[in-house]
Image: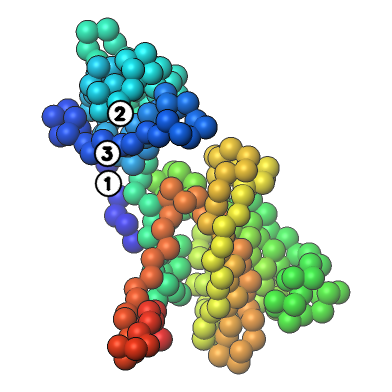
Amino acid sequence: MTSKVSNLVPPNPTADRLATPGHVDERLPMPLYHQVYLILRNKILTGEYGFGALLPSEQETSETFGVSRITAKRALNDLAGDGLVLRERGRGTKVVFHAPTPPVKANVEGLLENLLAMGLETEVSLLAFEYVRPTDVVSRTLCCDETALVQRAVRVRLLEKEPFSYLVTHVPDWVGRSYSRGDLAERPLLTLLERSGVVISRAEQTISATLADVEVSAALGLELGSPLLEINRVVYDQSERPVEYITALYRPDRYQHRMMLSRVGSESARSWLMAGE
Protein backbone atom coordinates (compact mmCIF):
# COMPACT_ATOMS: atom_id res chain seq x y z
CA MET A 1 0.00 0.00 0.00
CA THR A 2 1.00 3.56 -0.55
CA SER A 3 2.27 5.12 2.66
CA LYS A 4 0.90 8.42 3.90
CA VAL A 5 2.79 11.50 2.88
CA SER A 6 2.33 15.17 3.56
CA ASN A 7 0.40 17.15 0.97
CA LEU A 8 2.76 20.07 1.48
CA VAL A 9 5.37 20.28 -1.26
CA PRO A 10 8.29 22.62 -0.51
CA PRO A 11 8.32 25.55 -2.91
CA ASN A 12 10.89 25.27 -5.67
CA PRO A 13 10.17 28.10 -8.10
CA THR A 14 13.37 27.60 -10.07
CA ALA A 15 12.72 23.93 -10.77
CA ASP A 16 9.07 24.59 -11.55
CA ARG A 17 9.96 27.23 -14.12
CA LEU A 18 12.04 24.64 -15.96
CA ALA A 19 9.07 22.27 -16.44
CA THR A 20 8.73 20.77 -19.91
CA PRO A 21 6.55 23.03 -22.06
CA GLY A 22 3.13 21.79 -23.14
CA HIS A 23 1.71 22.10 -26.60
CA VAL A 24 -1.26 23.99 -28.00
CA ASP A 25 -2.81 23.42 -31.41
CA GLU A 26 -4.57 26.20 -33.30
CA ARG A 27 -6.36 23.57 -35.40
CA LEU A 28 -8.36 22.28 -32.44
CA PRO A 29 -11.90 23.60 -31.92
CA MET A 30 -10.84 24.61 -28.42
CA PRO A 31 -9.77 28.18 -27.60
CA LEU A 32 -6.03 28.59 -27.08
CA TYR A 33 -6.47 30.09 -23.62
CA HIS A 34 -8.38 26.98 -22.55
CA GLN A 35 -5.68 24.69 -23.94
CA VAL A 36 -3.07 26.58 -21.93
CA TYR A 37 -5.34 26.47 -18.89
CA LEU A 38 -5.78 22.69 -19.16
CA ILE A 39 -2.03 22.07 -19.49
CA LEU A 40 -1.19 24.22 -16.48
CA ARG A 41 -4.11 22.80 -14.50
CA ASN A 42 -2.85 19.27 -15.08
CA LYS A 43 0.64 20.24 -13.91
CA ILE A 44 -0.87 21.62 -10.72
CA LEU A 45 -3.19 18.67 -10.05
CA THR A 46 -0.39 16.15 -10.56
CA GLY A 47 1.97 18.05 -8.29
CA GLU A 48 4.43 19.12 -10.98
CA TYR A 49 3.75 22.63 -9.74
CA GLY A 50 3.70 21.99 -6.00
CA PHE A 51 1.94 23.96 -3.31
CA GLY A 52 3.59 27.36 -2.93
CA ALA A 53 5.40 27.20 -6.28
CA LEU A 54 5.38 30.21 -8.59
CA LEU A 55 3.92 29.73 -12.05
CA PRO A 56 5.62 31.38 -15.02
CA SER A 57 4.65 35.01 -15.54
CA GLU A 58 2.18 36.07 -18.23
CA GLN A 59 5.08 36.94 -20.53
CA GLU A 60 6.88 33.64 -19.87
CA THR A 61 3.66 31.70 -20.39
CA SER A 62 2.97 33.43 -23.69
CA GLU A 63 6.50 32.65 -24.90
CA THR A 64 6.36 29.03 -23.72
CA PHE A 65 3.11 28.26 -25.52
CA GLY A 66 3.51 30.63 -28.44
CA VAL A 67 0.35 32.57 -27.61
CA SER A 68 -0.45 36.21 -26.95
CA ARG A 69 -0.02 37.71 -23.52
CA ILE A 70 -3.78 38.30 -23.36
CA THR A 71 -4.34 34.57 -23.94
CA ALA A 72 -1.82 33.68 -21.23
CA LYS A 73 -3.45 36.11 -18.81
CA ARG A 74 -6.89 34.60 -19.34
CA ALA A 75 -5.56 31.09 -18.72
CA LEU A 76 -3.93 32.18 -15.46
CA ASN A 77 -7.05 34.05 -14.40
CA ASP A 78 -9.14 30.92 -14.97
CA LEU A 79 -6.78 28.94 -12.74
CA ALA A 80 -7.26 31.59 -10.07
CA GLY A 81 -11.02 31.40 -10.55
CA ASP A 82 -10.84 27.66 -9.81
CA GLY A 83 -8.99 28.31 -6.58
CA LEU A 84 -5.83 26.59 -7.80
CA VAL A 85 -3.58 29.65 -7.75
CA LEU A 86 -3.41 33.06 -6.10
CA ARG A 87 -2.48 36.03 -8.27
CA GLU A 88 -0.95 39.05 -6.55
CA ARG A 89 0.36 42.15 -8.25
CA GLY A 90 4.13 42.31 -7.92
CA ARG A 91 4.35 38.81 -6.44
CA GLY A 92 3.32 36.63 -9.36
CA THR A 93 1.02 33.62 -9.51
CA LYS A 94 1.41 31.15 -6.64
CA VAL A 95 -0.04 27.65 -6.40
CA VAL A 96 -2.40 27.32 -3.43
CA PHE A 97 -3.71 23.84 -4.28
CA HIS A 98 -2.59 20.91 -2.13
CA ALA A 99 -1.97 17.86 -4.32
CA PRO A 100 -4.12 14.94 -3.13
CA THR A 101 -2.82 11.90 -1.32
CA PRO A 102 -0.91 9.62 -3.73
CA PRO A 103 -3.34 7.09 -5.24
CA VAL A 104 -3.85 3.69 -3.69
CA LYS A 105 -2.03 1.06 -5.77
CA ALA A 106 -3.24 -2.54 -5.98
CA ASN A 107 -1.59 -5.36 -7.87
CA VAL A 108 -3.62 -7.93 -9.76
CA GLU A 109 -1.28 -10.64 -8.53
CA GLY A 110 -1.79 -11.29 -4.83
CA LEU A 111 -5.33 -9.98 -5.30
CA LEU A 112 -6.93 -11.22 -2.10
CA GLU A 113 -3.97 -10.19 0.03
CA ASN A 114 -4.15 -6.69 -1.42
CA LEU A 115 -7.85 -6.46 -0.65
CA LEU A 116 -7.29 -7.48 2.95
CA ALA A 117 -4.47 -4.97 3.34
CA MET A 118 -6.60 -2.22 1.80
CA GLY A 119 -9.40 -2.95 4.23
CA LEU A 120 -7.05 -2.80 7.19
CA GLU A 121 -5.22 0.37 6.17
CA THR A 122 -8.19 2.50 5.12
CA GLU A 123 -11.41 3.72 6.73
CA VAL A 124 -14.92 2.75 5.69
CA SER A 125 -18.30 4.42 5.86
CA LEU A 126 -21.21 1.96 5.75
CA LEU A 127 -24.12 3.49 3.82
CA ALA A 128 -26.46 0.49 3.56
CA PHE A 129 -26.84 -2.97 5.10
CA GLU A 130 -29.94 -4.92 4.14
CA TYR A 131 -31.41 -8.22 2.97
CA VAL A 132 -33.05 -8.01 -0.44
CA ARG A 133 -34.26 -10.12 -3.34
CA PRO A 134 -31.45 -10.44 -5.89
CA THR A 135 -31.56 -8.81 -9.29
CA ASP A 136 -31.19 -11.06 -12.34
CA VAL A 137 -27.47 -10.32 -12.50
CA VAL A 138 -26.89 -11.01 -8.81
CA SER A 139 -29.00 -14.17 -8.95
CA ARG A 140 -27.00 -15.58 -11.86
CA THR A 141 -23.66 -14.55 -10.37
CA LEU A 142 -24.29 -16.02 -6.92
CA CYS A 143 -26.13 -19.05 -8.37
CA CYS A 144 -29.16 -18.45 -6.16
CA ASP A 145 -32.89 -18.43 -6.77
CA GLU A 146 -34.52 -15.08 -7.50
CA THR A 147 -36.85 -15.62 -4.54
CA ALA A 148 -33.94 -16.09 -2.13
CA LEU A 149 -32.56 -13.34 0.07
CA VAL A 150 -29.07 -11.92 -0.33
CA GLN A 151 -27.24 -9.54 1.95
CA ARG A 152 -26.48 -6.23 0.20
CA ALA A 153 -24.11 -3.62 1.58
CA VAL A 154 -22.93 -0.27 0.27
CA ARG A 155 -19.69 1.19 1.58
CA VAL A 156 -17.43 4.12 0.81
CA ARG A 157 -13.75 3.57 1.51
CA LEU A 158 -11.58 6.53 2.52
CA LEU A 159 -7.86 7.18 2.62
CA GLU A 160 -6.76 10.02 4.88
CA LYS A 161 -10.41 11.12 5.19
CA GLU A 162 -10.84 11.37 1.40
CA PRO A 163 -13.24 8.97 -0.41
CA PHE A 164 -11.72 6.91 -3.20
CA SER A 165 -14.03 3.90 -3.71
CA TYR A 166 -17.73 3.07 -3.70
CA LEU A 167 -18.39 -0.60 -2.99
CA VAL A 168 -21.60 -2.56 -3.48
CA THR A 169 -21.41 -6.15 -2.22
CA HIS A 170 -23.87 -9.03 -2.39
CA VAL A 171 -23.37 -12.28 -0.48
CA PRO A 172 -25.65 -15.31 -0.04
CA ASP A 173 -27.99 -15.19 2.93
CA TRP A 174 -26.17 -18.02 4.71
CA VAL A 175 -22.94 -16.02 4.53
CA GLY A 176 -24.42 -12.67 5.49
CA ARG A 177 -26.05 -14.03 8.65
CA SER A 178 -22.60 -14.78 10.08
CA TYR A 179 -21.78 -11.11 10.72
CA SER A 180 -23.57 -7.95 11.78
CA ARG A 181 -23.83 -4.42 10.45
CA GLY A 182 -21.38 -3.35 13.15
CA ASP A 183 -18.90 -6.03 12.08
CA LEU A 184 -18.94 -4.83 8.47
CA ALA A 185 -18.48 -1.23 9.56
CA GLU A 186 -15.27 -2.19 11.37
CA ARG A 187 -13.71 -5.09 9.44
CA PRO A 188 -13.00 -6.02 5.80
CA LEU A 189 -15.63 -8.33 4.33
CA LEU A 190 -13.03 -10.94 3.37
CA THR A 191 -11.91 -11.12 6.98
CA LEU A 192 -15.51 -11.68 8.08
CA LEU A 193 -16.00 -14.42 5.50
CA GLU A 194 -12.93 -16.27 6.70
CA ARG A 195 -13.96 -15.79 10.33
CA SER A 196 -17.25 -17.52 9.55
CA GLY A 197 -15.40 -20.57 8.25
CA VAL A 198 -15.47 -19.78 4.53
CA VAL A 199 -12.24 -20.91 2.88
CA ILE A 200 -11.61 -18.59 -0.05
CA SER A 201 -10.07 -20.26 -3.06
CA ARG A 202 -10.05 -17.82 -5.97
CA ALA A 203 -11.64 -14.76 -7.54
CA GLU A 204 -12.57 -13.66 -11.04
CA GLN A 205 -12.82 -10.03 -12.00
CA THR A 206 -13.43 -7.71 -14.92
CA ILE A 207 -12.18 -4.14 -15.23
CA SER A 208 -13.97 -1.48 -17.23
CA ALA A 209 -14.91 2.19 -17.16
CA THR A 210 -18.18 3.83 -16.21
CA LEU A 211 -19.68 7.18 -15.24
CA ALA A 212 -20.76 8.34 -11.79
CA ASP A 213 -24.51 8.49 -11.24
CA VAL A 214 -26.23 10.79 -8.76
CA GLU A 215 -25.71 8.55 -5.71
CA VAL A 216 -22.11 7.63 -6.48
CA SER A 217 -21.02 11.15 -7.41
CA ALA A 218 -22.39 12.47 -4.12
CA ALA A 219 -20.65 9.75 -2.11
CA LEU A 220 -17.28 10.23 -3.81
CA GLY A 221 -17.39 14.01 -3.99
CA LEU A 222 -17.49 14.12 -7.78
CA GLU A 223 -19.52 15.84 -10.44
CA LEU A 224 -22.34 13.86 -12.02
CA GLY A 225 -21.01 11.86 -14.98
CA SER A 226 -17.39 11.85 -13.81
CA PRO A 227 -15.35 8.89 -15.15
CA LEU A 228 -14.73 5.97 -12.80
CA LEU A 229 -12.81 2.72 -12.85
CA GLU A 230 -15.26 -0.17 -12.41
CA ILE A 231 -14.18 -3.56 -11.09
CA ASN A 232 -16.65 -6.43 -10.86
CA ARG A 233 -15.37 -9.37 -8.84
CA VAL A 234 -16.75 -12.78 -7.86
CA VAL A 235 -15.08 -14.61 -4.97
CA TYR A 236 -15.33 -18.42 -4.71
CA ASP A 237 -14.75 -20.79 -1.82
CA GLN A 238 -12.86 -24.09 -2.02
CA SER A 239 -16.06 -25.86 -3.10
CA GLU A 240 -16.37 -23.47 -6.06
CA ARG A 241 -19.40 -21.77 -4.57
CA PRO A 242 -19.67 -18.02 -5.21
CA VAL A 243 -19.61 -16.37 -1.79
CA GLU A 244 -19.28 -12.70 -2.73
CA TYR A 245 -20.16 -10.50 -5.68
CA ILE A 246 -18.77 -6.98 -5.52
CA THR A 247 -18.97 -3.97 -7.80
CA ALA A 248 -16.24 -1.51 -6.88
CA LEU A 249 -16.13 1.99 -8.36
CA TYR A 250 -12.87 3.89 -7.96
CA ARG A 251 -11.87 7.49 -8.46
CA PRO A 252 -9.12 7.27 -11.11
CA ASP A 253 -7.18 10.09 -9.46
CA ARG A 254 -6.96 8.14 -6.20
CA TYR A 255 -6.62 4.53 -7.29
CA GLN A 256 -4.34 2.66 -9.69
CA HIS A 257 -4.64 -0.97 -10.74
CA ARG A 258 -1.25 -2.40 -11.59
CA MET A 259 -0.21 -5.60 -13.41
CA MET A 260 3.18 -7.26 -13.74
CA LEU A 261 3.74 -8.75 -17.21
CA SER A 262 6.40 -11.09 -18.56
CA ARG A 263 7.44 -11.47 -22.19
CA VAL A 264 7.23 -15.16 -23.12
CA GLY A 265 7.28 -17.46 -26.15
CA SER A 266 9.53 -18.04 -29.12
CA GLU A 267 10.77 -15.26 -31.35
CA SER A 268 8.05 -15.93 -33.92
CA ALA A 269 5.23 -15.99 -31.38
CA ARG A 270 6.13 -13.86 -28.38
CA SER A 271 3.40 -12.43 -26.19
CA TRP A 272 2.76 -10.81 -22.83
CA LEU A 273 1.73 -13.01 -19.91
CA MET A 274 0.59 -11.78 -16.53
CA ALA A 275 3.01 -12.77 -13.78
CA GLY A 276 1.94 -15.90 -11.95
CA GLU A 277 0.01 -17.44 -14.86
> What residue sits right under mark 2 in the picture?
65
Q: Residue at x 77, y 80 (%)?
A: 144
| Callout 1 touching callout 2 (CB < 8 Å) | no
Where is the N terminus found, in terms of image quarters? bottom left
Give the image quarter of residue 89.
top left
Q: Position of residue 12 (x, y in %)?
A: 16, 31
* SS of the residue under disc 3: loop
Residue 5: numbered disc: 1
Q: Position of residue 91 (x, y in %)?
A: 22, 12
In the picture, the disc for residue 127 is none
Classed neighbour count for the residue bearing mark 1: other residues with Cα under 10 Å, few (<14), some (14–19), many (≥20): few
Q: Amino acid at mark 1?
A: Val
What residue occupies the far left of the structure in this picture? 14
> Is 55 situated left or right of 159 in this image?
left
Residue at the spot 55% in from the left edge and 73% down from the top edge: 205
Front of the two marks 1 and 2? 2
Q: Residue 277: horizontal and vertical position, in percent?
A: 41, 86
Which callout, 3 or 2, points to the residue nearer the camera? 2
x 56%, y 62%: residue: 208
Residue 48 disc label? 3
As shown in the figure, which amino acid type bears the numbered disc 2? Phe
